Image (tube, rainbow, N blue to C red):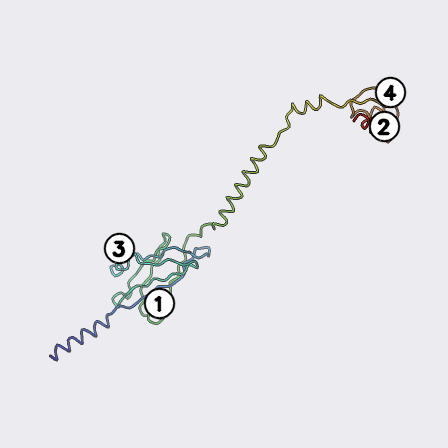
Amino acid sequence: MKPVVVIFVSLLVGSFQASAETYSIIGTAKFSNGPPVSLEDVTIECAEFEYDCHSFRGMGSETNRFGEFEISIEVDDSYDGAELILTILGESFPHVIELEDSRSSSDSVNHDIILDQKSPPSNVFTGFGCAVIVILLAFLAAIGRLPQRTPMSTKIRTLNPRILNCPVCDGRLEGHLLIRHLIVGHQMDVEEASVLAQESFDSEE
């Protein structure tokens, strides 16, 4: 019985030594111009011949609104040094499993991501741009509906000038010519001609 017990104990100890442990990758994803990559998936992919990685393929985490993410996987010593590929928005970032670093920092390692691409325009500015375009189109449409002065309407006005009687000679002439007529034809000064012209206008109303 004793040899059997020894073998069982040895196997049990060996299983504890090779037991899985949690390995967490934490970090922040940002665009190249600074803003965080919010609410996007960070996923594990594998190189073609990186067989130690394949059991984690497809695992991942979604970033929060600050771009922070955390991916936790279960590993043992055999995975130490294995290369994972973190992918987000079509870009890839290699990550090598370092168990010593993980064990010395509460089972987690830091891996920040900086994308090559810039952040897309904010929805606020996109909506503002659409609003400006709508207002501009409405303004142009309003201008198009304004009544236009046509040559015919101008001609109608000029064909019907106001006719007044000269207060001196009782001659009839267009109203806008009365002051000049009084000054030139009747030798009046400007002030007197203006007064008489105004009186003629008032009397004709």
Separation of residues labelled 3 and 2 (CA atoms) = 106 Å
Q: Are marks 4 and 1 in contact (CB under 8 Å)?
A: no
Separation of residues labelled 2 and 4 (CA atoms) = 12 Å
**Mark whose residue sits in front, 4 or 1:** 4
**Mark whose residue sits in front, 4 or 3:** 4
Quadrant placement of the C terminus: top right
Residue 48's tag is 3
Q: Position of residue 15 (x, y in %)?
A: 21, 71
Q: Amino acid at mark 1?
A: Ser
- Secondary structure state at the residue bearing disc 2: helix
Who is closer to the viewer here, 43 or 159?
159
- The residue wearing badge 2 is 196
Q: Amino acid at mark 3?
A: Glu
Q: Residues within 10 Å of mark 1 (few under 14, many from 20)?
A: many
Who is closer to the viewer here, 148 or 7?
148
Separation of residues labelled 1 and 3 (CA atoms) = 26 Å
In the drawing, does residue 76 fall left or right of residue 88?
A: left
Quadrant placement of the N terminus: bottom left
Residue 169's tag is 4
**Mark whose residue sits in front, 3 or 2:** 2
